[in-house]
Amino acid sequence: MKTILYGIFFYAVSGALATDSATSSPLKLQLQARKSKALSTTERVYRALEKYGLATAKSSGDGSIDLISGYVDVEYVGKVGIGTPPQYFSMDFDTGSSDIWVPSTNCTRCGSHALFNPALSSTFSQPAGNNTWQLQYGDGSTVRGVGGQDTLDLGGLKAKDQVIGLVDMETMDLAQDTYLDGIFGLGFPSLSYTGLKTPVVEALRQQGVVDRSIVSFWLGRSKDAGRGEVMFGASNPAHYEGELKYVPVSHQKYWQVDLTDVSLDGKSIMNGTGAGIGAIMDTGTTLIVLPTQLSRTIHSAISGAKYSARYGWRVPCKPTGNQKVVFKFGQNEFPLDFKDLARELSPLDDPSLCFSGIAEAPVSLAIIGDTFLRRYYSVFDYENSRVGLALSKS
């Protein structure tokens, strides 16, 4: 069996991949980076909350796919082919949603996105009856279309008869995103709107394309030129240190685990309840979104941090000292240096400040996005309903 690899460059893979098959044949494909606008922190928080039905109104204030960050340390996409012959799309690999969708030629409001033409694919099929679907968010923004089935081309390896959402209408904020064409959802079927029954990772295993129903992520930082890698069917030890630590999924609608503690300087800041909160591991979200008090306690420990209702938290781009915030998932602790929290430069009054990678919201759960996942290599294990984490390396 083979391991699917997408990449930035073609190159020989050194070291063994963590897979049970001795015949895995990694493949990496070169991808192109595009520019996109940088969203404000408050806008990013709102988009993250939208996905989980938590936003009601905007604040007034064995395969690996190498990825490219569209706006350094902000967004990661990779190329996926759909149909026979394949039509290629830049897609966001998102563990926070479950559907695979791209704009179709029937879409008249899809901006400059690549459009899928079913008539050009010899393997496309469409179920009889009503197969329309729609995703509507808390602010009324919408994407809608019809469902179909076709072959996915992942680095030359094929996943047959996969459920694809063909978009015929998307709202302006989606249409204006010139960096990605669609979403490649990697969540559980219970979150699907397009009728997905079997996750694509499990379908790849059932069809003998990969050995294991897992998908793994390395999200490179700015020093890695915004590169990254997503691997189907295996993990890649070349991109992590030590052993993977696994945390069981506690709520299988999402990749949700238990955040049992958060600590600063060895002291818990979870109000001593010991109960913890749910935490959704979401590769499609830029930030770590925390309940308001947790976020404020962390930022109050960062010398020079500033908050505004309009822009959210800003932190020094080059913090002094070696302070860390420690997240405990299940029984395992994962430190995050304060320096890992600095995002893009804040275009405001102080050039020494950057937007923070941690944001606050009036919610009772956490969303663990790319701010954390750049620091830790992540493995999403469908077979055993667990998430593996290990310190990331380039």
Image (cartoon, helix red, strand yellow):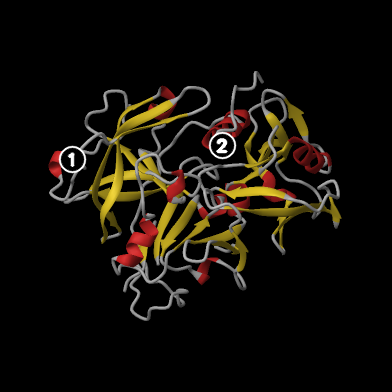
Position of residue 336 in the picture relative to residue 383 (left or right): right
Tell me the kind of residue under disc 1: Pro
Q: Say above or below: 102 vs 81.
A: above
Q: Position of residue 43 (x, y in %)?
A: 58, 29
Label 1 vs label 2: CA separation? 31 Å
Q: Position of residue 27 (x, y in %)?
A: 33, 65
Pick whichever of labels 1 and 2 is earlier in the sequence.
Answer: 2
Helix, strand or loop under label 1:
helix
Q: In the image, what residue occupies the spot 26% across and 60% down?
A: 156
Position of residue 251 in the picture relative to residue 317 (left or right): left
Q: Position of residue 111 (x, y in %)?
A: 33, 26
Q: In the image, what residue occupies the spot 18% across and 45% down?
A: 125
Of the pair 63 and 68, the residue shown nearer to us: 63
Q: Position of residue 71 (x, y in %)?
A: 50, 40
Circles 1 and 2, Cβ within 8 Å, touching? The answer is no
Give the numbered dot on residue 118: 1
Position of residue 14 in the picture relative to residue 53 (left or right): left
Position of residue 115 in the picture relative to residue 355 (left or right): left
Give the numbered dot on residue 48: 2
Of the pair 275 and 157, the residue shown nearer to us: 275
Helix, strand or loop under label 2:
helix
Q: Residue 27, can we see it?
A: no
Tell me the kind of residue under disc 2: Ala
Q: Quadrant of the C terminus?
A: bottom right
Residues packed near mark 1 inside 10 Å, few (<14), some (14 to 19) or many (20 plus): many
Residues packed near mark 2 inside 10 Å, few (<14), some (14 to 19) or many (20 plus): many
Give the tally of numbered discs. 2
